[in-house]
Every structure is written in C-alpha cells, then in structure tokens.
C-alpha cells in the first residue's frame, strides 16, 4: 500500500491531545468475610479479656428416696484474653501533586486516603484469619492479636500424611501465644475430615453454619463432595439450562453450612465456624487524623486498634494440613 508523497501523519504530528479514560480501574479485592460476619464489641484496654464457661457432661442421675443432699463442686469460669493490634497507614501528598489536574480523581490526597482505608480493611482481615499468635508487645515491638486459626485448638482435624503439625490454642492458657505449625507432609482434604470437624464442633455445643476457606480449598469441596447442595436450577421449558460447577452450600447431618471463600486465608486450612462465638473488639475504630505539616505536603494517617474475641473456640473447628493440589 503506497502513501501519497508528503502526506502528514500522526507519527510526525505535535500537540495531539491525550486520550486517557477519566477512570481508574482497580480489581484488588476488598471483601472481608470474617470481619463482616463476626459480631462487634468494644475493648476498653489493650488487654481485652472475657470469660467462658461450660456445663458438666451429661451423666446418669438417679437418687435414693430421702437421701442426704451433697453439694457438687463448682467449677470456676475460664478467663481468656487477647491483645489489641494497632493497624496504621500514612498518606503524604505534596502541594504540587494536589494542585495539578489528574485523570480519574479530583484530589490526589483524598484518593490516596480512600486507597489506604481499603488496604487497612484487608490488613485486619488478614490478621484475623491467618496463623498469627498473640503477644503483648514491648517498648520496641508491636503487640499482635491471636488469630482465629490460632484460637481453634480443641476441634482440630489434621489430614497430614507425615509428621503431624503442632496445634497451639487457648486450651492450656489464657491466649494462644503461637500460631499453628503445619505438618511437613500435607494431605488431601476429604469429606470425612470435614464431617468429623463439623461433628466435633456440634458435640461440643456449637452450631457451625459457616465454612470458610481459600479459593483452592473451596474448589476442592465443589469438585466432588457428596454433601454439596444441588448443582441444577429449574428452567422453563425450551429455555437454555445452566451448568453450575460452583458450590455455596454444604449440607451435613447437622444442617446447612454456607461455604464462603476468603482470599486472605492460607490454602492449608478450612475453618468450620459458629459465628455466634466470634467477635471483633475495637479499642479504637479506624480514624483519619491530620498530622503536622513540616514541609510542602499534606500528611495524615489512618489508625485503628482491634483484636479477635474468641467467645468459645470449642463451638468451632478446623481441618488443617491441607494440600489443595492432592
């Protein structure tokens, strides 16, 4: 194809107006399923404490007519605790950056604040559902909240194939000081293991209606567990039917369980949760505070302080040491 002589093309043209969409596309996930579903409560100290109790096991109870009544020894409540964790993000935007015209946002400072708030939500969810042990912190070290995975110890089911992982939890102390240690040989998640975990939580008095897992573990459940809910939808005669490969509901002998994917969970764990016994306690809700100017920039931070309240870890369970590829 020939180009006429001296045809002026855009490759030589100067001053072409930019064509930039006045939008910013960000697909970073901001869903926080555990924090959203958990109950909310207030902390009034960096050491947040609560109590748990349990009834005596059911047993034979028959008494002789007219027998002398003897008092039964009372068992004290158990006092548990967690430490509030400070989460913070800082924004610093120069005066020039705020003055120039930009695509997709009217004010760079406000835009960066919005991003940091979303990031903090993700950080709180990450701290809540990973294998993080609790610590009080010190003058030069940050306090850490004990996470959900670390709290669950009584009803822990392992599918490991080699050396068992060590499960740390609040059964021997007031809070879990270390997170769980995975097995050196993870195994395949089985439906029998899931049923066992649900049964353990139910026998302890829980009613775990939420199954929470990474996307890979959710796919494992969807791929072949017999307890998954129906994969079909009713359609009108002559209409195109849909093939449904995903599963959002698992049905066991103890009822229906909502299967929720969590992007911030480890792929080696499936949590079986009774959400009535989990809460997020806030000492300070996320708040934006302007910081003193020490130059030609606007500076602010967003800070909040939270911890997980495990109201009774026996009401929940977990399946650990999962290799989702097996």
Image (tube, rainbow, N blue to C red):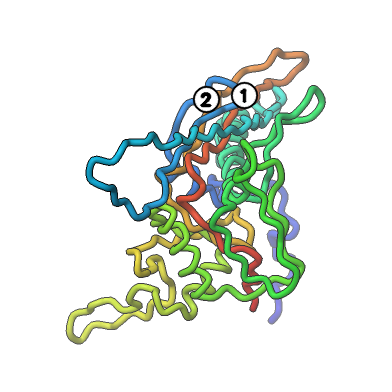
Left or right position of 149 against 247: right
- How many numbered discs? 2
Which numbered circle lies on residue 43? 2
> Would you call the spot at circle 1 few (<14 residues within 10 Å), some (14-19), or many (20 or more)?
some
CA separation in Å, label 2 and label 1: 8 Å
Residue 295: tell me if it is visible.
Answer: yes
Relative image position of residue 212 (x, y in whole percent): 50, 58
Identify which residue, 170 or 133, lies in the foreground: 170
Left or right position of 227 against 175: left
Q: Quadrant of the C terminus?
A: bottom right
Relative image position of residue 184 (x, y in whole percent): 76, 67
Which numbered circle lies on residue 156? none
Q: Quadrant of residue 88?
A: top right
Decide: is 18 above or below 100: below
At x 74% / y 70%, what residue is drawn?
5
Decide: is 166 above or below 324: above
Which numbered circle lies on residue 46? 1
Decide: is 191 above or below 119: below
Relative image position of residue 303 (x, y in whole percent): 62, 26
> Would you call the spot at circle 2 few (<14 residues within 10 Å), some (14-19), or many (20 or more)?
many
Q: CB under 8 Å between callouts 2 and 1?
A: yes
Identify which residue, 304 or 4, lies in the foreground: 304
At x 47% / y 61%, what residue is drawn?
200
At x 52% / y 28%, what residue is drawn?
282
Relative image position of residue 234 (x, y in whole percent): 23, 77
Q: Quadrant of the N terminus?
A: bottom right
Q: Secondary structure at mark 1?
A: loop
Residue 28: tell me if it is visible.
Answer: no
Q: Quadrant of residue 186?
A: bottom right
Left or right position of 153 against 60: right
């Amino acid at each position: 194809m020939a180009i006429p002589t001296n045809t002026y093309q855009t490759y030589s043209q100067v001053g072409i107006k930019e064509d930039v969409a006045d939008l910013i596309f960000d697909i970073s996930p901001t869903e926080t399923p555990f924090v959203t579903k958990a109950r909310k409560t207030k902390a009034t100290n960096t050491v947040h404490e609560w109590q748990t109790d349990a009834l005596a096991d059911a047993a034979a109870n028959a008494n002789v007519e007219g027998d002398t009544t003897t008092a039964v020894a009372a068992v004290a409540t158990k006092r548990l605790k967690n430490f509030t964790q400070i989460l913070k993000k800082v924004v610093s935007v120069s005066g020039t950056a705020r003055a120039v015209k930009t695509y997709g946002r009217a004010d760079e400072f406000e835009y960066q604040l919005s991003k940091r708030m979303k990031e903090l939500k993700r950080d709180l969810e990450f701290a809540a559902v990973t294998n993080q042990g609790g610590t009080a912190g010190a003058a030069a070290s940050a306090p850490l909240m004990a996470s959900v995975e670390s709290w669950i110890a009584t009803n822990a089911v392992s599918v490991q194939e080699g050396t068992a992982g060590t499960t740390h939890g609040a059964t021997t102390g007031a809070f879990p000081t270390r997170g769980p240690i995975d097995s050196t040989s993870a195994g395949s998640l089985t439906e029998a293991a899931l049923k066992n975990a649900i049964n353990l939580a139910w026998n302890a008095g829980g009613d775990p209606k939420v199954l929470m897992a990474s996307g890979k573990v959710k796919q494992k459940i969807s791929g072949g567990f017999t307890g998954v809910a129906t994969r079909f939808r009713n359609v009108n005669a002559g209409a195109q039917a849909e093939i449904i490969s995903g599963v959002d509901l698992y049905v066991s002998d103890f009822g229906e369980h909502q299967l929720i994917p969590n992007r911030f969970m480890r792929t080696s764990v499936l949590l079986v949760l009774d959400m009535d016994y989990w809460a997020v306690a806030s000492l300070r809700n996320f708040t934006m505070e302007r910081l003193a100017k020490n130059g030609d920039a606007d500076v602010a931070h967003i800070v909040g302080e939270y911890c997980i309240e495990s109201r009774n870890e026996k009401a929940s369970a977990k399946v650990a040491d999962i290799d989702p590829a097996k």
